[in-house]
Image: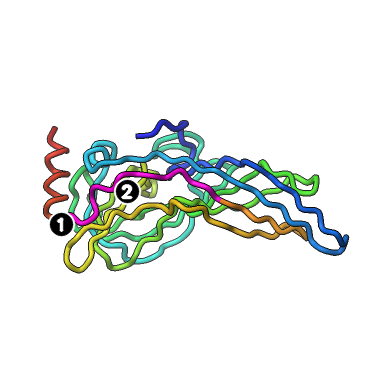
Amino acid sequence: MSNTPKRLWILIGILIIGTVVFFIPSQPSQPTEIRITSSSQTITVNTLKEMTHLADYIVVGTFKSFDSIWNAARMGDGPDAKPDPHHYAEGRLYDFRVNEVLKGSIPDRTIKVSIIYAKEEQGLNINGQPTRLMMRDPHFVAPVFGKKYILFLTKANNAPPIYGIPFHPYQIQFDGAGKAVLKKPNSRPIIEKKQSGSTQVVITHETDFKINDTITGKDFKQIKAEILRATKR
């Protein structure tokens, strides 16, 4: 597992602003274009054994629907941490139907799972003005409703109970034949365009996400047996 700073957001998604290049237009009436490169780090795991040991909860079930958006930025770690009034991280809440719990204790049949979609970057200076921009989290993996999953989770909030993401990858999806597909974040740069007044901001999100996938292709029974063996050690 890679070494990373202490996390501020429940889903690990630390965006670090890198190179900024200004392109000055030849005509004053034309908008200025600013190009920003952001690099991203996350906690990564490489084996099913690591995923099992590091997750507080492991559940089998299906994503049912999108619920709402909340500010997942917290003033510290743990499910009792207070919301951070000075930072914003867009957490998308999904209703997940729990069919089986492989690790931890979850009494509810339906839980809310928070996946960070974007966060507000406050440290930008555009045309001499301090600027806040919402930046996409390049590690976001959209769930597919109705598909069978195994999720590896942590507790993001106690009241109301919300479950979050402790590392990447954390989703194992199963196809119609019961074969596993490890859902990984995009390893290629993502281009995002934002407008700030008359200035167009072009953001290139770079990620160093690389793992050796040893899970895809296995069947559900095999993966479940490996998880249960790991939880007993």
Residue at coordinates 65% horizontally, 56% vertically from top-left? Answer: 202
Given residues 68 and 224, the one toward you in this image is 224
Q: Secondary structure at mark 1?
A: loop
- Which residue lies most toward the right here? 28
- Any mark on residue 170, and which? 2
112 relative position to 39: left or right: left
The question of residue 219 being in magenta is answered with: yes
Q: Secondary structure at mark 2?
A: loop
Q: Position of residue 100 (x, y in %)?
A: 18, 54
Q: How is the image coloured?
A: rainbow
Inspect this view and state whether residue 221 appears.
yes
Question: Over which residues does the magenta segment extend?
Answer: 205-220
Query: Which residue does the numbered mark 1 point to in the structure image?
Result: 219
Label 1 sits on what residue type? Asp
183 relative position to 7: left or right: left
Label 2: few (<14), some (14–19) or many (≥20) C-alpha neighbours in 10 Å: many
Residue at coordinates 38% horizontally, 44% vertically from top-left? Answer: 210
Residue at coordinates 65% horizontally, 48% vertically from top-left? Answer: 36
Given residues 204 and 105, the one toward you in this image is 204
32 relative position to 141: left or right: right
Task: Tell me the quarter of the picture where residue 28 sits.
Answer: bottom right
Q: Quadrant of the N terminus?
A: top left
Label 1: few (<14), some (14–19) or many (≥20) C-alpha neighbours in 10 Å: some
